[in-house]
Image (spheres, grey):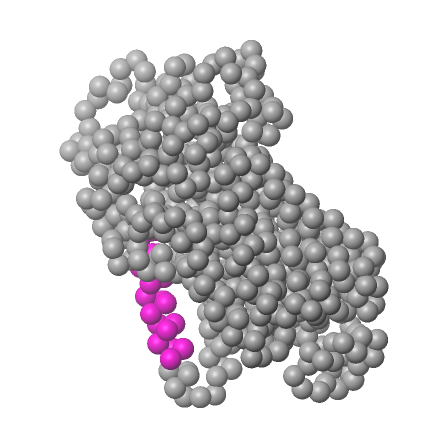
Amino acid sequence: MMRSREGESSLSRSGAAQDASKEYGTLMSVLSPSDTETPSKGRRRLELTSSRAVDDVSGQKNETYFEKKVVVPDYPNGWYGFSFRKLWAFTGPGFLMSIAYLDPGNIESDLRSGALAGFKLIWLLLLAHCIGLLLQRLSARLGVVSGKHMAQISYAMYPKIPRIILWLMIEIAIIGSDMQEVIGTAIALNLLSSGRIPLYGGVLITIVDTFFFLFLDKYGLRKLEVFFGFLITIMAITFGYEYIKVDPNQIDVIKGVFIPWCSHCNSQAITQAVGIVGAVIMPHNFYLHSALVRSREVNRNTRKEVSEANKYFFMESGIALFVSFVINLFVMCVFAAGFFGKAAGEIIDKCPAINKTLTSPVAYNDTLDVDIYVGGLFLGCFYGLPALYIWAVGILASGQSSTMTGTYAGQFAMEGFLNIRWKRWKRVLLTRSVAILPTVFVAAFSNINRLTGMNDVLNVVQSLQIPFALLPLLHFTSHPGIMKSFQNGIGMKIAVWLLGFCILGINVYFSIETFLAISVTWGRVLISLLMAIYGVFVLYFITAALGLHQYCQKSQIFQDFIGAKADFHSEDDDNDEFHDQIVLVNGQESDSSDI
């Protein structure tokens, strides 16, 4: 039910409804002045304006990232259609987010999928990107509508223990992703130097280059976004070159995209298919995207600007993930055409260097495992040395770009979950040290197979962390006090819940596979215990998302966080309608339109 402007707002509500309305206030009252400042009407060009974000809980200044915000140009002459200038103003956060879909772990998942199943899993890669777009849309809307990112809202919504558990799970996901980036960079440097830079040396070099890239944002937010766009362009050119060089059958590519089936796929291919979801969907990326969208000046007091920002961010995310899909498609098709169906002996005969990477002899007709390193050697032997070096450049760009987004995600997580603000170099030193120490150990005392084999384990770890991002995301975007009329509609809730249960099913599958692969009794007991604890944590966040316990609404922290009741308000009649929309917990009055 919606209040009319002619006076229906004066109707009395029940006491329960009044209490619910107070409980489900918006987050708008705690926004900093820079978050709610409306750009002047006369401004028409895209520019940056200085603004210092304020810590929402402590009130301290936050100079970590968004010291400047991008001003969105006004519509000329009151025109409200599509504008390329506005799309350009909103372009940036989606491409930074999409880098997580192009990290070395994803690249390795692509090439293994192509090598094991040919073109038969391309449709699953497309599906994973579509699922990612759906979820990234929700995270972007959360940041735009509330003015907060997921970690900040988690601080207000969850008790201390679940909040810390949630933070730890996201940190595990970030560190796992960071390890993949370190591995990818080390292998790329080893290939580019023809083995002169040892793997452990490449791992150590990543410490230096991370600090170098860390301070690029001091030159301005837009310049940082352009730099990341440049790295994505490098990946598109290098992997696109490999695609053209290998020249896969285009009919097979089209069939792989549009025929959702994997006929005659063996157990390895099925396991790899399941792993694609864990490799593509990064849990910490939802937290990152909800924070990055705050870099644009949006007046959240008016419906039109909020709705417009949601629209353009969705369009930009769609474009960015389409580019990501095409790059991943290049990699999968290269190894589907060049590697799939070839016997190990046939490959080794033409590329003896691969034989040095094997830990044990293989029969001529065996299937040869492929990874980022072996893939580079394979391309160099079959398609010439330029293919090897260009491949290594693409992997290097992948590792370097995803390193920075992981650092940003970690900083936002720490600031939001713990209300702790570290200097950037301290944050990088911590996460990079945790990622580097085990990687250096493996690189120094083992061979390349063990190092690249870590990516498979890390992809499984990423998949296990997805519920700890997906469930809070569904919880917050369905919360009427946070999202008001932008809360999830029934269709969106059903779609995301179905997706959540599918991902939980994937995790159960991986758990059973791991359990069966362990023959030692104490190992099975340990895995069973860990999965039981994991199940309890997931169940807690499921009940929170379903509203089966009321701690979140009764939390004093939440009440302090949302402050006094504040509705969207505006200067025109259309926005008055938006101001009049009220969402009550008992459903007596609601508007859950999915705008």
Q: Quadrant of the N terminus?
A: top left
Q: Position of residue 107 (x, y in %)?
A: 64, 60
Q: Residue at x 38, y 28 (%)?
A: 34
Q: Quick one: 135 or 46, which is closer to the camera? A: 46
Residue 294: in sight, yes or no? no
Q: Position of residue 76 (x, y in %)?
A: 56, 14
- Displayed quadrant of residue 105: bottom right
Q: Residue at x 75, y 57 (%)?
A: 390
Residue 536 is inside the magenta segment: yes
Position of 168 relative to 422 (above/below): below
Q: Residue at x 50, y 12 (%)?
A: 42
Position of 195 relative to 254 (above/below): below
Please report the bounds of the magenta region as a residue range.
Answer: 526-547
Q: How many dots with numbers?
A: 0
Q: Quick one: 220 or 320, which is closer to the camera? A: 220
- Displayed quadrant of residue 431: bottom left
Q: Position of residue 472 (x, y in %)?
A: 38, 51
Residue 37: in sight, yes or no? yes
Q: Quick one: 169 or 540, which is closer to the camera? A: 169
Q: In the rendered view, does 182 fall on the left or right side of 252?
A: left
Residue 228 is inside the magenta segment: no
Q: Does the magenta stretch mainly form a helix, a strand or a loop?
A: helix
Q: Position of residue 94 (x, y in %)?
A: 55, 41
Q: In the rendered view, does 224 fall on the left or right side of 231?
A: left
Q: Residue at x 54, y 42 (%)?
A: 216
Position of 334 relative to 509 (above/below): above
Q: In the rendered view, does 205 fall on the left or right side of 349?
A: left
